[in-house]
Image (cartoon, helix red, strand yellow):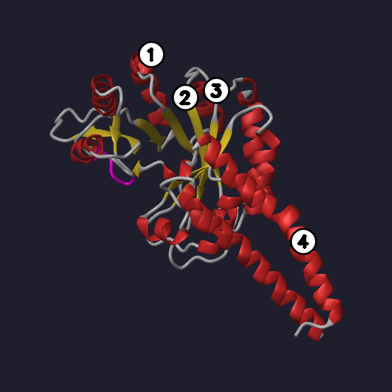
Amino acid sequence: MLNGGMGKSVQKWIACCLILGNIKTLTMAATIARSDTNLTSVLWAHAVNSQKLLDEALAGKIDMIEADIVLGTLENDTSGQQIPVMGHPPANVSDITLETFLTKILDYNTLNPDRQKGVKLDFKSTVVYEGSIGILNSLWKRMTYPVWLNADILPGPVNPTSIPVDANFFLSASKNFSSAVLSVGWTTQWGPSFSEGAYNRSHVDAMIGAIQGNNITGSKHEITFPVRAGIAAQSLSELQRLYSSLNGTNKLTLTIWSSAGDRVDIEKLRELIFDFGVDKVYLDVPEEVSSKLDLGRNGASSLWPSLLKFSFMNLAMFFVTQILSTRN
């Protein structure tokens, strides 16, 4: 049995947990129940960089189509003309151009107003974004569904080798697309063998500076920060600071993404998601990660078990530390 001093300590903590600590859990669930806004339940089609994959995404039940844009050539085009095409580096030959890709989504959404799909456009270089602006301008007024403009605009963890899109050019040009969600992140290096890495103070300060320096805080654009799951799981405090620095001027969310095989601390990632709230976090990760997170992605009622499990885990951790401290 617990000794008298420790027993009273535990009792006091449980009371505080019920009154204060678990209020966060209960409030989160109540918010979801009221608004029915669980952004982790949004379904993604990732790397839709071909005609076939686009047709499958449009025919499927997904909500958001994510695709990459590079400066390259169209298959069987003997002219060799460099234009924005769908593809992920190092690939630079595709069977579909950006213009065709956007037109097909526009046509689908026009014919299916009750089943419209949003699109996230991931521009892989400054030059391809510059070459895409005219295409976006020609279609923009008719694209009345969610359109995200995405780029890695700053170098991030862990010593990445890819070159960021120029932050000032991307942000200043994107301001002209008033309804766009600006999805701005960092280049990263991660994989199955990585365990150490985080978005640190300098990464966050540079992002805040780029957004404020280009007056995005005065533009009322919605901003989402795409963060890599394995790195974000180890970056809670700095991501909290990023959010608190800008949420007074812009609507903010995180978009957690991951490559297949990435090492991810599931418990830490779940803690981050619950800390921000599922109404502020999109989740674009492989099934191997999402299934382990157990976030109740079908709605608020199925989220309760995970929220309570999260709370009881914290309670158990407290018991362990109290027992160890008493023995010492």
| Front-most of residues 325 and 133 | 325
Relative to 232, does residue 151 appear above or below in the rendering?
Answer: above
Q: Earlier in the sequence, mark 4 or mark 1?
A: 4
Q: Separation of disc 2 and disc 4 at Cα?
A: 46 Å
The residue that mark 2 highlights is 180
Q: Position of residue 19 (x, y in %)?
A: 75, 54
| Front-most of residues 161 and 124 | 124
Please tell me whether mark 2 or mark 4 is closer to you in this view: 4
The residue that mark 1 highlights is 141
User: For numbered disc 3, what is the local secondary structure?
Assistant: helix
Mark 3 neighbour density, 10 Å: few (under 14) some (14–19) many (20 or more) = some
Please tell me whether mark 1 or mark 3 is closer to you in this view: 1
The residue that mark 4 highlights is 15
Q: Earlier in the sequence, mark 3 or mark 4?
A: 4
Q: Earlier in the sequence, mark 3 or mark 2?
A: 3
Q: Separation of disc 1 and disc 3 at Cα?
A: 19 Å
Relative to 125, does residue 194 appear above or below in the rendering?
Answer: below
Q: Earlier in the sequence, mark 2 or mark 4?
A: 4
Please tell me whether mark 4 or mark 1 is closer to you in this view: 4
Q: Amino acid at mark 1?
A: Lys
* Badge number at residue 172: 3
Residue at x 33% of width, y 16% of height? 139
Q: For the magenta stretch, what is the residue range?
A: 89-93
Q: Amino acid at mark 3?
A: Ser
Mark 4 neighbour density, 10 Å: few (under 14) some (14–19) many (20 or more) = few
**On the image, which quarter does residue 277 sit in?**
top right
244 sits left or right of 75 in the view = right
Name the quadrant of the N terminus.
bottom right
